[in-house]
Structure formats: C-alpha cells, structure tokens
Image: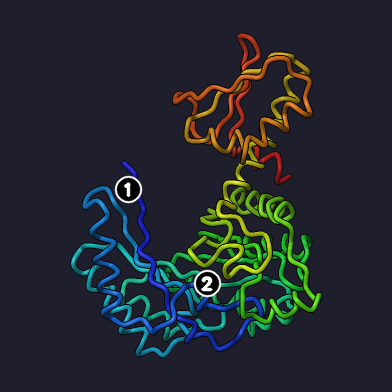
Amino acid sequence: MNKKRYIIPIFVPHKGCPHDCIFCNQKKITGQLEEVTTGDVNTKIKDYLNTIPDSGSQIEVAFYGGSFTAIPLEYQEKLLKAAFMFIKAGRIDGIRVSTRPDCIDERIMANLKKYGVKTVELGVQSMDAEVLKLCNRGHSPEDVVNAVWILKEFGFSVGVQMMIGLPGDNEEKAVKTAKELIRLKPDIARIYPALIIKNTYMEKMYIRGEYKPMTIDAAVELSKKLLILFESNGINVIRIGLQPTENINLGKDVVAGPFHPSMRHLVESLIYRDMMVHLLKMAGGRKEITLRVNPRNISELIGHKKSNIDFVKSNFFIDKFEIFQDKSVEPDTLVLFLGEKYIIMSKKDYYSISSK
C-alpha cells in the first residue's frame, strides 16, 4: 500500500538570498518576519506530527522561503540538526530544501547529505539569459546546469521551479525553458505564474506601466502546455501557482497578476476539456453521449463553475449528454460510450497526442 505523503513546511526568511529579485518579497510570500530558531523547528514539527497518523505516512520536513543554502553554514547546520533529530528518532523520513542554482557547491551538498536532506529544489525561474537579467536573478542558465549536475552527483532528488510571465518572458521562451529543464532530467517541477506582490520592484514597474502581468486565461493555457511537456517526459509537476495564504490573495499582498486559489484545478480542468473534445470528435456527431469517470476526477471533468459542461453544450449539437461517476473507471481516465462500444482515453494518452 502506498504511503500518504505529508510535508511539514518551515519558512526561512529572506536572509540567505544574495540578490533582490524584482518579483520577490519573501517576507510577504512566507509570512515569516522573524528569524527561525531551533526551538521554532522543534515546535513546528511536533505540532504537525500530532495531526499526522503514526502509520501509513511518509513525512518530510521542508525548509522553504529564502535560499536555504545561501544562509551561513552554521545557521544551516542548526536548523538541519534540529530536524535531523526527528529522523534519528524515526518520526520523519527526510528533509527537503529550496535554494538558488548559484548557491550549490560540494561542501554545502556534503553538509545537507550529513543531516538527512533528500530533495533539493532549485528556483530556476527561467533559462533565458535576458529574462534572468531583467529580473535581477544574479545567476545564469549555466549555473542551473552546473547545480543540477552537482546535485545528481551527490544523489539528491532534484526539483526545478520555473516562473512564467516575468518581464521579457513570452510563451516561446517559457516552452524553451521547460524543454531545457527536461533535458536536465529533474525528478519534480513546479510552475508559478508571476504575481505582482506588494513592496517589490515589479510593483513599481506595474504602477509606472512598464510591466503587464499575464491574464488568468493566458496563464492557465500556458501552464497546461508546460504541464504536458513535463509530465509526458516523466517529470512530475507537484504544484502550479503560488499557495494561497491569509495574505497571498488578491486585495491583500497580491497587487495584480494571474492569481487563483486553485490554479492547478483550472489547468487540470482545461486538460479534461481537451480530452472530452477529442472523444466527442471521435464520436462522429452522435446526438446521445455518455461519459464515465472515476469519482476523484469528476470536479476536473465538470470544470470550474461547470465551465466544461457549458463549453460542450455551446460547441456540440448533442441532444442528450450524461456524465456518470464510476469507481470501476481508472483514475485520470475518461470512457465514452457509443451504444455497446466505448472509447477510453487516459491523461497519458492525451499527453502523448498533445506533445507531438
């Protein structure tokens, strides 16, 4: 039986990052204003463990927020050691950290390995040199390649995080970034549509009319294309869109941009719409259509506010359109019934068709 995965997030302040990226205000994004102490780490882990089942769970502590490997090594060790005690006690399974591509070297990696870190996620953002320069990232595409190589040499699971819609970015550059990252063969990826956060340089650019964020529709459509690219190449996309919090919401610290509390759901719903359209075209103009789907996928099939159902009714001349939840249908699969015959399409089938 597969174990259910749990992440215990510990947000480290902006202290470690040597650059002020134009889109970034880590204090706003993480909600973390004070320096994290070893006591904070202990308390946070214990509090989370009290809510997680003792058996059938795979638990990781994740140091998010700032660039973890850019903070002083002594401070890194204190935080890691506090979490490592729970690994030694058999209460958690591992640690993951997020950092910058230019803050990776053999000494730092050896230290992470010593304290049970299993996964390192790199904030790549883009593999386009112009976009990186305009965003004041302070690292190059070559730094990304070198960092991934070092991480793999040390046996870490590698994650990459990319942003879309940054100044100087466009769909062509974003797709190229995804393809270059795929060639590096990371284990996981995240896709973040760029948001305008309060008290960032990008907010000033927006106010002056020098920067226009993506629309939500454009961000969803491009995220869909990137998701297909990654997933069809065996790279699991574990998140799309910044996680909403009390402050990370429109009208709070998000000034503008393609923010939605369920960005992944919007993207997945668009994929299910495409799958449904593909099947309906294969149905050859039939007037009565029956679709079956696993209950866990019914929300994505119907779409946000029933958008997929409305789309089908508006674009296909169907007299009777029925959708049934069926536990016997494999997850991530649609079954179209045509009388006694039926057509099956899985998301993997769709990815294969769409990525050609």
Which quarter of the figure is the C terminus placed in?
top right
Dot 2: within a 10 Å radius of its alpha carbon, few (fewer than 14), some, or many (20 or more) residues? many
| Residue shown at the point (72%, 82%) measured from the top left | 133
The amino acid type of the residue labelled 1 equals: Lys
Left or right of 307? Residue 332 is left
| Residue shown at the point (54%, 66%) measured from the top left | 248
Q: Identify the image's colour scheme: rainbow, by chain, secondary structure or one colour.
A: rainbow
Q: Secondary structure at mark 2?
A: helix
Residue 184: x and y in percent read 60, 65
Outermost residue, left direction? 89
Location of residue 352 with respect to 336 vertically, above or below: below
Distance of label 1 from label 2 (alpha carbons): 30 Å
Which quarter of the figure is the N terminus placed in?
top left
Nearer to us: label 1 or label 2: 2
Residue designated by label 2: 29
Outermost residue, top direction? 340
Residue 214: x and y in percent read 74, 61
Left or right of 252? Residue 180 is right
18 or 24, nearer to the observer = 24
| Residue shown at the point (38%, 71%) measured from the top left | 10
Residue 267: x and y in percent read 63, 47
| Residue shown at the point (62%, 73%) measured from the top left | 197
The amino acid type of the residue labelled 2 equals: Ile
194 or 127, nearer to the observer = 194
Residue 176: x and y in percent read 73, 63
Q: Secondary structure at mark 1?
A: loop
Location of residue 246 with respect to 304 vertically, above or below: below
Residue 3 - label:
1
Outermost residue, front direction? 251
- Which label's residue is closer to the chain start, 1 or 2? 1
25 or 162, nearer to the observer = 25
Q: Quadrant of residue 333?
A: top right
